[in-house]
Image (cartoon, coloured by chain):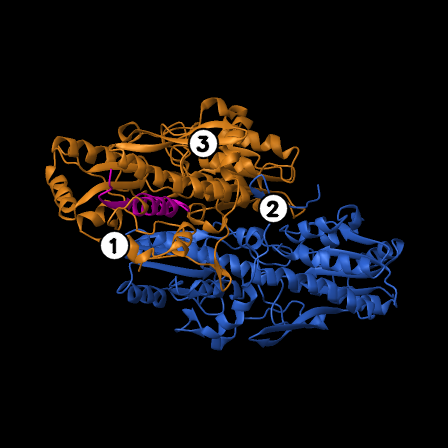
Chain colours: A orange, B blue
Amino acid sequence: MQLGNVVVGQSGGPTSVINSSLVGVFKTAKDAGCPHVYGMRNGIEGLLKENFIEMSDYVKNDLDIELLKRTPSSFLGTCRYKLPDFTKDEETYKKIFAILNKMDIKHFFYIGGNDSMDTIDKLSKYSEIIKSDITFIGIPKTIDNDLACTDHTPGYGSAAKYIAAAMKEIIRDATTYSTDSINVVEIMGRDAGWLTCAATLSRSEDCAGPDIICLPEKVFDYDKFMNKIADIRKEKKVITIAVSEGIKTADGKYVCEANRRSMTEDAFGHKTLGGTALYLADFIGGETGVKSRGIVFSTLQRCASHLVSRRDITEAFTAGADGVQLALNGETGKMITFERISNNPYQLKTSSCPASAVANVAKMVPDEWIINDGAYVSKEFAEYARPLIIGELSPFMVDGLPRHLFLD
Amino acid sequence: MQLGNVVVGQSGGPTSVINSSLVGVFKTAKDAGCPHVYGMRNGIEGLLKENFIEMSDYVKNDLDIELLKRTPSSFLGTCRYKLPDFTKDEETYKKIFAILNKMDIKHFFYIGGNDSMDTIDKLSKYSEIIKSDITFIGIPKTIDNDLACTDHTPGYGSAAKYIAAAMKEIIRDATTYSTDSINVVEIMGRDAGWLTCAATLSRSEDCAGPDIICLPEKVFDYDKFMNKIADIRKEKKVITIAVSEGIKTADGKYVCEANRRSMTEDAFGHKTLGGTALYLADFIGGETGVKSRGIVFSTLQRCASHLVSRRDITEAFTAGADGVQLALNGETGKMITFERISNNPYQLKTSSCPASAVANVAKMVPDEWIINDGAYVSKEFAEYARPLIIGELSPFMVDGLPRHLFLD
């Protein structure tokens, strides 16, 4: 089958490897003879405004491809736009399909997380109703690793590698003083604690790793937490604690809410989190009198392309490339998934699942991997995650800094 | 001259390259035939407790040397200990010299900043009074770059490189959304803004760089600050602001004090700073209604040895090595300094100055380099700083993470 025109978009929070998936779609589509690969600026929002670029105007050669693989954040820009239900608001759908038809687009690719798969699901279902021949394929992307139906998600490995490396450096820094201290490190993750778990990967021959890991999968209890700290303080002068930004107390309130004047919400109704580490560091300092510090990885954990996992970059590219293959096979309403065949040696194959099975669902850290009464993660987690952080991809350094490919 | 026994210590805040200076002292001393190179655990505090290691027990071969160069934070541990005035408390000095004599130590090296040079100055002066033949040499170290008499300090280049690279990634991340936002990035620097200035190095062909840079050298004025933001917002949706943790308002108060319950002080009477970015982000958000975020590099900027400047690593080693040479020449009470011979090509030579000229003095960013009514830095700064961030030194990666050499 000959590939028709392609449009590709990026949605949701950026990652260090989302552009590798974009390149995977672009290169594979061009190699398959696709006349035009259009990029939507800022996802579906840009599409609705007919704001496109011709990808080959910007990605002109193999060097650009390699540069884009090494560029963090979404090259095309991103959005957090929730498509309405088409039974309630058909106009938006009519507009989208009119634009797609006008540009003679046959294949639509959306690189994103579970909210983006909701978009793929809705568009493919509407396409079926109106008997359009346009196919809709989702390419998984999220540092959160919380997508259903897939072993892991592109973006997670690099974020995990950054978190583990930074954790190790923070612990090395903190233990250089002869004084007691407690460091609380806040890691992204609203509902699922996958990223926070990655802190444990810093544990190795040359590093003790964090002492406590608090995940949103478990209710946060101040008394248990302080007792745990008191126990560890009997043996250690410097304590390091990794906490998810999304931890909640038994009343369902985020720990960070205690310290915030107000919490705004995004288009999907998610509260904007942040402040957990600083609040806990202050709390611990007050209770124990020990010097305490809150450290927040903030956006660095999702955009530090100077320290990516080579395996993650490669898999992200493959997810994009194999998405194009799905479209070539005439499939629609699907998301690319990863299946792990073996761990040692690490072997992976791609497959696919209905986008509906991923949309609006979050995959949690398995309960059996959360140990020490909710205060740590098991070695099974480390065995699962370690292969995902292996290998490096050197940035192209210009004047001492990583060079990126970018749109104005 | 034959080198006698050596003792070396590390003091003050750790850096990514302080261990390269340690290795420079160790290797040069051993190569010069020094029988024992002892390391003080936690600086002068460890010396007073007779807590030493024999360096060659831990640094056994060239691989260990390379590994230690790539290990962030102070291998020997650090302290913030202020020596008393010997006219007021001679006992501490008697104790120190008794210990040094007992171990037959002839040369004392201290790797640190201006507080550490105070230690070198006091010990060398006391040594002269009691007619001891022990020499005392300071090896400069600080990410703050605020030491007098030297072109720059080992540690600054790597911190500047990390700050510039992270800044670039943060800007890339922030500009991916179609929505307006203001990001305030807090960078270390109590009195001098050298590190915060480094944010401007992110400005290049592929990055606009920060829009505003606030240094402790200039009084922080809320009205001027908000007017500047309003001006920039006429042209840009996403604004990035780099602020020193040490910025103060006209009344002499730290901006971060407004948001803190209390500020503790260290042994040198310095207040523990932090919270500037979060406070300003909240303030800006409240005033403008624009989504704002505070990002704090925290200890990452001084311990991210996964992204060091190769030039900085090399110069840090040279500072240690040339410090030993000074001692071989019978000098004492001196600190190694750097003199820049030319910028293009970059050429540097080492020299020395009296430790007393560095002790307790802070070198500020020159006034003529601070432009835009105190809200930015000139290209002269970039020309000065750019050569210091050039080159990389790959970490030794084991299981996906940088490997370090460490003491239990």
Tell me the distance, in whole angstroms, between the alpha carbons under discs 1 and 2: 47 Å
Question: Quarter of the image holding residue B206?
Answer: bottom left
Which chain does the residue under circle 1 lie in?
Answer: A
Label 2 crowding class (10 Å Cα cut-off): few <14, some 14-19, many 20+?
A: many
Does residue A279 belong to the magenta stretch? no
B111 relative to B385 in the view: left or right: right
Residue span colored magenta: A1-30
Does residue A24 belong to the magenta stretch? yes
Would residue B112 be seen by someone viewing this image from the given angle? yes
Question: On the image, numbered disc 2 is attached to which residue?
Answer: A174
Which chain does the residue under circle 3 lie in?
Answer: A
Task: Give the SS element for disc 1.
Answer: strand
Task: Give the SS element for disc 2.
Answer: helix
Question: On the image, numbered disc 1 is attached to which residue?
Answer: A53
B248 relative to A270 in the view: left or right: right
Residue A152 is situated, as x and y percent measured from the top left of the image, at 42, 33
Tell me the distance, in whole angstroms, between the alpha carbons under discs 3 and 2: 38 Å
Of the numbered discs 3 and 2, the one sitting upstream in the chain is 2
- Indicate which disc residue A348 carries: 3
Which chain does the residue under circle 2 lie in?
Answer: A
Image quarter in which the C terminus of chain B is found: top right
